Every structure is written in structure tokens, then in C-alpha cells.
Amino acid sequence: MVTLRAYKYALNPTPRQARYLDGHCGAARKAFNWGLGRVKAVLDQRAAEATYGIPAEMLTPAISWSMYSLRKTWNQAKVTVAPWWAEYSKETFASGLNQLATALKNWRDSRTGKRAGRVMGFPRFKSKRKTVKSCRFTTGGIRCEERYAVLPRIGRVRLHEAPASELLDGTVRIMAATIRLERGRWFVSFTVEQHTPARTPKRPDAVAGVDLGIKSLAVLAEPGRALAPIPNPKYLDASLRKLGKLSRRVSRRVGPDRHTGQVPSNRWKRANAQRNRVHHRIAYQRADALHKLTTRVAHEYGTVVVEDLNVAGMLKNRRLARRIGDAGFGEIRRQLAYKTEWNGGRLVVADRWFPSSKTCSGCGVVKAKLLLSERVYRCESCGLVMDRDENAARNLVALVVAASGAETLNGRGADQKTRPAGQVAMKRQPGSPVHETGTALPEAVSV
């Protein structure tokens, strides 16, 4: 099986190499802003001419937004626009123009209804201060040596750790390399094409329901039983006191001010660096915990069931936003999606309207209302008393277990409200009854 994977490593560049890395990212930003300015000028000119009553065939000719056309025009104008273009790799400018072509295509497809999801806005110019510094290389001398990454025009940059053996012995094909400045450090990510043997989870026939929460990060359940809940480490909450102390220290120093041209003092720089290190440590701790959790689940179970949570809507609750963001619900689902595929399993996403918390896992009765403060589920029909997260996890497992061989209740998937007792549904996707990585299951089943 051929798969695309990425190997990401931290870099330890020299001061000169760091400036060169920064210059390549600035060159990509320059090409992006130049192309966007040209496209925007033509669009504004055509819109102004249309207000004068000029016929459509007499308007300023439209220009192509494809990567090929943008790069061809850039090569004709780069001597005037960027006289220093020869100092950097040609792939740097192609990276910025490729980002622009993708952004314009997403905006056009969103307006015409070809792109699903939230409405995409028109691309904006990239700021030197706020834009994440990034650049992608697809051609040239890209390879890994012992403790070094070789990049076009930049040369050999020392890696913080030894690279994987696959990158050294030539068993993988390096397709691209991306440099990126994250949390004050430079990283390089190698996109490779790799032949991997087919994998099988430890328990291919096992099904696990994963209910995410704040009190417990995840509650796993198997058919007929629930496992011990995984506690939420709450790394941000544990560091709030220290962050508050450092933030007050930063506020007392003389910081930068763009309006007055005030330059930050050295004491402000040191205090701000101390605060940033705490934020970076929290992010690394959270990423490590989530990777360990998702890797363990993907290696163990053949089928994993999760909910389609409206994380963006949940973050609007000002009382829970910080804890929801610290838990990383969206990241857990993203990691489970590709890790289950790598390990030969599948991920089933329950419909957003499936009442997993309101449904009794014993008799299937659905409560009309369940407050968030009710942490224990009590069924008035059968007398079941159970932790609400454990009850939800068991319902997610029953969703897949009962789906094998059951018929759908509504072929069109039009019913999106809370279903009667004993009826459940899974999320539909274009061309597939449910959203999963594996064999499709019925949209709605009876348990």
C-alpha cells in the first residue's frame, strides 16, 4: 500500500541560515501579495467599468487565476517587482503563487456552491508581522543526511534529532519539504511517498465508542461494558496561575507600540519570552497526550465510533470555551481519522443530531431534555442509573453493532431532529450513507 506521510523535525540553524530561512518565507509572501494585487486590480477595474454601462465584451480582459498563468506572469515581471529574486529558490515564489491560486479557487467554489462548509472570504494580503512564516519546496536538492536536512539554496541545516531511517536509506520518495516557524523555532516537514505493509488492529472485530468530554477527556465503551475513563490532564488550567503572573510582569514593562513607534525594552522582551515558553510547553504537552490517546485506540480497535461535535458552536459558550479549547476535541477526531486508516481500521462518525447522551443505553428511551449539570443519567423507564458519559459511549457502540444487517429508516436522511426511542442515525456524506473510513453502514438503524 502506497501512502503519503510527513516527517516533521525541528531545525537548529545558524544565525545566517535563520535569516536565509526567513528571507525565503518573505519571498513567498512577496509573490502572494503581488499576485493578489494584480488579480484585485483587474476585478476592481472591471467592476468600475460595469457601473459606467460599458458592455461586458468591452470590459478590461479578465486574467486567469491558475497556478500556471500566475507563475508565467510572475517570471515576466519579477525583474522589476523583485530585483533580488535570484538570491532565493524559484520554488519559493511558486509556493506563494500556489497558495494564492488555491485561495482564489476556494473562494470561487464557495460562492458558486461547489465547495461545502463555511463560506470562504476573498483572499487578503499577507502581513509581515502576523502571517505564519512558511515556504514549500517541491523540486531541487531535497534530502536527509545524518543529522542534517538539505534544502534548495539553503544548504545543509542541522536537525535537532536524528531523522528516521526511512529518510536515510532511500526506501521512501521525498515529494516536498516545507519550512515553517512555529513557537519561535524553525521546523521542516518532509512529505514522502511510502510503501507500507497492510496493517491490522490488535482486535479487528472489536468496536469502541469514544465519548469526549471536559471532566474526563474520553470515555471508551465496548459492547456491553465501559472501560475506565481517561482523565483530562487540563494542562492550561494547571498553568493559569503562572501565566497570570508572567502576563502581569509583561504588562509592567515598556512594550512595542506601532502607532507611536515605541521600541520594546530588553526587559519586556525577556518577560515576553518567559511567558511564551509556558504557552509553548502547554501546547507540546497537549499534543503529546492526544497523540498517545489516539494511537492507542487506533492500534487496538477495528472500528472506532465518535460524535460529530459542533466544536465551533461549543466555543461560543464563554463559561466552557477555555476548557473545550484545552481538550482539543477537533484534533482528536482528526488524528483518529488517519490513524485508523493507517492501521487497517475504520472511523465511524455519528450524526450530529444523534442523542447519545439523552438515550438510555438499557432500554433505548430518549429523554426530552437533559441538562449539562446532570452528570448522572437516570432513566425513568427502566431505572438505569449511570454516568452520562459512559451511557453516551455505550450508545455509540450500539450504533455500529446494531447497524450490521439493519435496514434504513429514512433513505433520504431528511429527519434531523431528535428521533423516537430506540432510533439512531449516523452522519451522511456525498456518495456514502455515513462518514467513515471503511465499509459504509446504514444511515439509521433500530436498536
Image: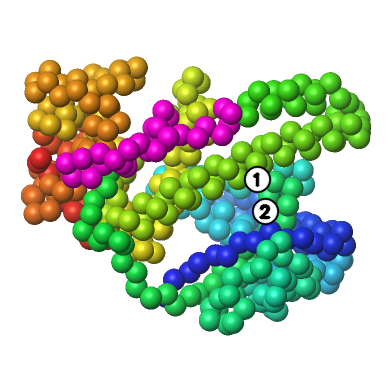
Within 10 Å of disc 2 (Cα), the crowding (few <14, some 14-19, many 20+) is many
Please tell me whether mark 2 sits on a helix, a strand or a loop: helix
Q: Nearer the viewer, residue 338 or 213?
A: 213
Q: Which residues are magenta?
A: 210-238
Q: Is residue 379 above or below residue 115?
A: above
Tell me the quarter of the picture where residue 275 sits: top right
Q: Is residue 163 above or below residue 315?
A: below
Report whether residue 338 is seen.
yes
Q: Nearer the viewer, residue 125 or 408?
A: 408
Residue topped by disc 2: 36
- Residue plotted at (66% across, 23% down): 241
Report the amino acid beneath label 1. Answer: Arg
Residue 297 image point, x, y percent? 36, 51
Q: On the rendered image, what quadrant is the N terminus found in?
A: bottom left
Residue 26 image point, x, y percent? 77, 56
Q: Is residue 440 left or right of residue 11?
A: left
Residue topped by disc 1: 124
Report whether residue 41 is seen.
no
Residue 193 image point, x, y percent? 50, 74
- Residue plotted at (12% across, 47% down): 402
Q: Is residue 252 left or right of residue 428?
A: right
Q: Nearer the viewer, residue 320 or 231?
A: 231
| Circles 2, 1 touching at the beta carbon (< 8 Å) | yes
| Colour scheme of the rendered structure | rainbow
